[in-house]
Image (cartoon, helix red, strand yellow):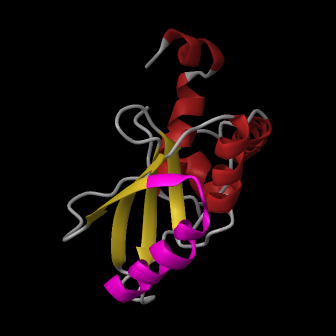
Amino acid sequence: MSSTLTEMLDSIDIDILRALQTDARLSTRQLATKVHRSPTPVFERLKRLEAQGYISRYVAVLDADKLGRGFVVFCQVKLRHINRDIASGFVSLVKSLPEVTECYNVSGAFDYLLKIYAPSMADYRDFVLNKLGAFDFIGAIESTFVMSEIKREYAIPL
């Protein structure tokens, strides 16, 4: 753990964050029991952690297969050329596409890495042709199709 993090958070804060990463639906009372504290101070710490941005939101992790969105693709995108306006336009496009669940500006041969959930290969092809392909400055796309998921963790190691 970095010294900056330890200066800002104490061991109780870290225990609260670890517990919430495992189960964000814990009540304040349950959370207090897990971290061996009383509910009122834990509630106050929780509100502080939220206000300071350590906790940005609470979500449910859904089963993509059961929802018919189990075709997962990592798509690398290279723009033909890049400047502030082109990058901003691409970011706006990506943010508007519900199929894209994650997007990273990366270094290397490509400019962006996208994680996409689609119902099928045909749906992904339509996504590339009709949605990504609508952006004029895309120079290259390389797709990597997920055959099986080995590990998926959302918790940040603390």
Magenta residues, dominant SS class: helix
Task: Left or right? Give the position of 53 relative to 1.
Answer: right
Q: Position of residue 68 (x, y in %)?
A: 42, 89
The stretch in magenta equals 121-139
Answer yes or no: is residue 36 visible. no
Q: Residue at x 42, y 31 (%)?
A: 107
Depth check: 16 or 93 in front? 93
Relative image position of residue 64 (x, y in whole percent): 41, 79
Is 12 situated above or below 68? above
52 or 142, which lies in front?
A: 142
The residue depicted at 34 percent of the width and 37 percent of the height is 109
Q: Residue at x 51, y 36 (%)?
A: 15
Question: What is the quadrant of the C terminus in the image?
Answer: top left
Question: Which of the two residues, 27 or 36, is positioned nearer the viewer here?
Answer: 27
Please name whichever residue, 52 or 24, is drawn nearer the observer in this view of the structure.
52
Asked which quadrant contains residue 49, the reply is: top right
Q: Is residue 5 above or below residue 82?
A: above
